[in-house]
Amino acid sequence: MSYERYRSGGLGLKTGIALALGVFAVWSLAPIVWMVMTSFMRQRALIVRPPDFSPASFTLANVTKIIGESDMLWQGILNSAAVALLSTAIALALGAPAAYALARLRLPKAGAISFLILATQMLPGIAVAIPLFLIISRIGMIDHIVTLALVYLTFNLPIVIWILRGFFLSIPDSIEKAAAVDGAGVVQTFVHIILPISRPPLAAAAIFAFVEAWNEFFFALILTRRSVQTVPLVISQFQGQYQTAFGQMMAAALISVLPVILLAIVFRNHIIRGFADGMSKG
Amino acid sequence: MFVAPALLVLALMLGYPILQSWWLSFQRVQLQAGRASETWTGLDNYIRLFADATFLQAAANSALFCLVEVVLVTLIALAVALLLNHPLGRGGIWKIMLIIPWAIAPVAHGVLWKWILNSNYGILNGLLMQLGVIDSYQVWLGSPVSAMAFLLLVDIWKSVPFIALLLLAGLQRIPQSLYRAAYMDGARPGAAFRHITLPQLRGAIAIAVILQTIWSLRVFDIIFVLTSGGPADATVMMNFMAYRTTFNFLDIGYGAAIANVIFIVTVLLAIIYIRLLQPREPGAAK
């Protein structure tokens, strides 16, 4: 038995693995497939037992109706996009320099500060939600895009710092030494040398922050009223209103998750490396 | 200068509210016509916790939910990670399958499952009926045990991918030379798994367990969408109860006390997590 054969197992094991992979694929995809199918099925095909899967049951009507008529959903998508972009931009602008300093500049207590920042990322929203709600109501900032974007920094800033810090730690010393020999200061080194080579982890951190902000529900529920409802809120309300219009309901949910799913698929390798390293490296 | 803005934001958005939350929890706060009136009550809110049947139920629910979810997620994620570490599971398609459940909004995910579990037209009922497993359509979210079981199923589906990625990264850090040595010594693959893979993966598994516990404690969105805590408060967990007490019942001081219980448990878990991270790379945290 060769080593390769030893590592990948005999025919029996391979068959077992292939079967298990099949089960995993069905488990992962079945709910999603059903969501997509429902979005394209007529109501009368869905409310028979069992559902009617004949070709005549399929239609674009749900999707076109939702796209054409649901101002609420579009408003939600615009609000979510604005909140997520703003929050991500601020998190990167504040987080990248902080991560660099914590990883590379010999700050006193850098390790302790880093771990404190990591710990804040784990705090449940409810631990800060009540005081935040009271303060924000008092200053009249409930239902503002900016409020939500700033509150999302409570989880996005730590994520961004932690992902970028992991990458900055791995940069060889020689790069900074070369920059210092050429007379570059700390700020110049960071802006002209470090940032340009950090595009992949910056992308990972940005996507991560964007997806988290896009999907966030708890703070949005507490801190918004009518005008800046984000997409998850709109979907949860649809569910109350269109309780029995299953096709439209699923079409709306599908449209609401499509942007971040596409982003996640396109950038999957960056994200996977970013979060696997970020969460398990000291 | 580099770190100050970030720390300032975190101190303002997290540090101050945390202190305020403790301050509130020692008071009775009443909202009337949009104004809060506060009366100092000392530890009353915390004492009340121990006599409150709803809270004790919520704490028990949280504990049960966390325990079952952490065990199942870790086991399933370990199996998935091992599968995807095998040459047959290396293709890019498998990564897509892990990343999609992660990226789906918990709310959309909850709404999707509410439709799957629908008691009149849900596909789960349809499927099980066709297969002859059930002889009439079931109200899956209608009884306490089954509602809890389905909440677990739905949250496990959403949580497995992230933990699997964490464990997969751990598997890929195990030096191949160890397996080569085991092969040379004639160890059977099962023995190699027990004596190399599992011990080498211990750190990653410990981290996965802690992180998943923290995440299970704060599950909210799917409860809100799927059961709203029902039937008969059977799926009310601490996080949901803190929300409901504060924002529906407007009992703000008591809500803050419940929130602080979750806060303390999370902090303890976070300390363990950080302890786990540190010794593995002693030079990194300088």
Image: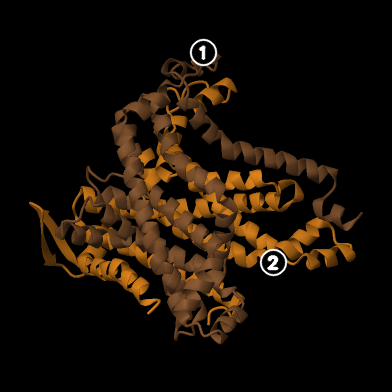
Spot the brown chain and give its letter.
Answer: A
Instruction: Give the percent coordinates (x, y) of residue B206.
Output: 57, 65
Mark yes or no: residue B34 visible.
yes
Label 2 belongs to which residue?
B199
Instruction: Give the percent coordinates (x, y) of residue A147.
Output: 26, 57
Left or right placement of residue A95 versus residue A275 in this view: left
Q: Nearer the viewer, residue A202 or B200?
A: A202
**Of the residues shown, which amino acid type is indicated by label 1?**
Ala
Alpha carbons under labels 1 and 2: distance apart: 56 Å
**Of the residues shown, which amino acid type is indicated by label 2?**
Pro
Label 1 belongs to which residue?
A56
Left or right placement of residue B231 versus residue B90 in this view: left
Disc sitting over residue B222 in the figure:
none
Q: Nearer the viewer, residue B193 or A139?
A: A139
Which residue is painted at 49% across and 47% down in the image? B103
Spot the orange chain and give its letter.
Answer: B
Circle 2 residues within 10 Å: few <14, some 14–19, many ≥20: few
- Give the letter of the chain under mark 1: A
- Give the letter of the chain under mark 2: B
SS type, badge 1? helix
Which residue is painted at 40% across and 58% down in the image? A88
Instruction: Give the percent coordinates (x, y) of residue A127.
Output: 32, 62
Circle 1 residues within 10 Å: few <14, some 14–19, many ≥20: few
